[in-house]
Amino acid sequence: MTTNNWWKTSTVYQIYPQSFKDSNGDGIGDLNGITESLPYLKKLGIDVIWLNPIYESPLVDNGYDISDYYKLDSQYGTMADFENLLTQTHALGIRLVMDLVVNHTSNKNKWFEESKKSQDNDYADWYIWKDPKPDGSVPNNWGSSFGGSAWTYVPERKQYYLHLYAPEQPDLNWENEEVRDAIYKMMKFWFEKGVDGFRMDTISLLSKVQSFPDAPLEPGRKYGSAYFGAANGPRIHEFLQEMNREVLSKYDVMTVGETPHTTSDQAKLYTDPERHELNMVFQFEAMHSDYGYYGRYSDLRFKLSDMRRIMNHWQLAMDGHGWNSLFWGNHDQPRAVSRFGDDGEFRVQSAKMLATVLHFQQGTPFVFQGEEIGMTNAHFTKINEYEDVEALNIYRDLKALGLDEKLIMSMLANKSRDNSRTPMQWDKTENAGFTTGTPWYQVNSNYQQVNVKQALIDPNSIFYYYKNLIKLRHDLPIISQGRFIPLSEDDSDVYAYIRQLDHQQLLVVGSFNRHKIRFAVNESFAVDQAKLLIDTYGDKPEYRKNILYLRPYEGAVLKLG
Ligand code: TEU
Ligand code: CA
């Protein structure tokens, strides 16, 4: 099926369902809560909603452990509620994309329950089973993303199964054609219902190196990275091309693959339209710019120079060869304004500036729920305030390594996924208007200042700024199609670039400094002849000749032609 590539001018809004809006007072966000909130999303102007998993699940990893792909988890509502949401969404001209989690299932999925019973049953080969080493130990040194070994022993089979995530998330065996067919059939089921695409969880990990080699070990570490034998594996492109042929090509849908540990060369293979795989991928290179000695959980702050180098690289690399996704955060990342901006005095300014430098790049922007009102990290200080399986395991592992409690708590406060999973802040009533009951997870203590109701009455709010950005992407072809030209790549505080299409140019600048600073614009851009397109302060920055005087965290876009 040919499409008009509608996703190239679209902005996607990501909803983490359990934390978005509770409609029935049980403290858990649900489908009817999303349906009720559609007018809000329409007002923001987004084109597509992506829902994190809502399928039946024991919820060990908040729904990324699916026990039945054809059922919804009852905590979110019924299939009728879902169909109603889909109909209402479409009626507003918004599309709905679901999460596709097919690297692994829940251990409570009937496929796994059968598979683990014996070495010869109909599902015996649906997961990745390996004999122990002669001394009974694990087949190789791969570690799970959530800590510990990636292998768990099952006495009934006298074998280990592989799980790149929690033991309750066994990896499917994609070498098995029956598995692939079962997945394709399930995808068609959702497309036939009218779903408009999939965000594909950890899709780059499906194809494992079949010799299951040990990964190189860093000094002092017990486990090697499972990515070594799983990321961008030998048959991944063959599998995705098959999936495209069998399913995706038959529908007008959008696909975004989540591809941990993917370089731009690999991303081109996934997203080059000629190759018929995916439309775009989520890559995490920029998100690694504040990783530390222990990986993602660190007490480091990112540097603008690293971030800019990575982002510029991806802009230039993908132009004409594939397509970028653009994001500052999601349900696995801390809140963007806390991590990359300033969530204190300059919360509003820095949130708008971050949005500016991202939304003028080429690609499809993703807005994570609450980002459009500048929701911040939770600043938890005690381990019992954390909920996420990853945070709890990391805490245990770092403790075992002898790290200081205070240091661990600061690492979690900076980086925990729980930061983005606190309930959406709708208003300043109890529980931020998220629920009339007891919320499944505590609300961020700043909800009285930071909430939707407040944002909607303030014409200068972050919300209306995002609304503008989303509209500009619809109106100006230069934003989706223009050439990307990096500027001042050695500047200590300003992220700047030019977009160009025919005789039109946009100059995009964003200051990451909390003071007023000067920024000399490349001579070729005539600042005095440019018109203001958008500015985080609402008016054009002061300038003299080609020097702009940028206010704290100011973001601005000037237009020529
Ligand atoms: O995340 C995959 C992934 O790469 C994670 O390791 C991610 O980098 C990490 O969580 C960051 O801390 C996906 C989902 O987005 C995540 O929520 C799931 O827990 C994970 O897959 C397993 O399904
Ligand atoms: Ca509910």
Image (tube, rainbow, N blue to C red):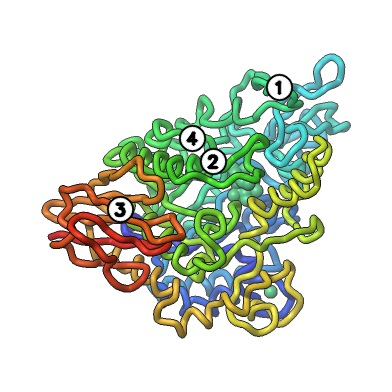
Tell me whether circle 3 and circle 2 mark residues in contact (CB < 8 Å): no
| Residue 195 in sight | no
Residue 122 in the image: x percent, y percent?
A: 72, 36
Q: Type of residue at label 2?
A: His
Residue picked out by circle 3: 519
Mark 3 and mark 4: span between their CA atoms?
34 Å
Crowding at mark 3 (Cα within 10 Å: few <14, some 14-19, many 20+): some
Q: Nearer the viewer, residue 168 or 467?
A: 467
The numbered mark, 4 or 1, whose residue comes first in the sequence reads: 1
Q: Nearer the viewer, residue 77 or 530?
A: 530
| SS type, badge 1 | loop
Label 1 C-beta lies within 8 Å of the nearest ligand 1 atom: no
Residue picked out by circle 4: 262
Relative side of 34 to 131, left or right = left
The mark found on residue 288 in the picture is: 2
- Name above or below for residue 131 compared with residue 38: above
Q: Type of residue at label 1?
A: Pro
Residue 525 in the image: x percent, y percent?
A: 17, 52
- Nearer to us: label 4 or label 1: 1
Report the residue at 81% width, 59% height from top.
Answer: 384
Mark 4 and mark 1: span between their CA atoms?
24 Å
Report the residue at 75% width, 22% height from top.
Answer: 139
Tell me whether circle 2 and circle 4 mark residues in contact (CB < 8 Å): no
Q: Type of residue at label 3?
A: Phe
- Nearer to us: label 2 or label 4: 2
Residue 30 in the image: x percent, y percent?
A: 63, 71
Residue picked out by circle 1: 219
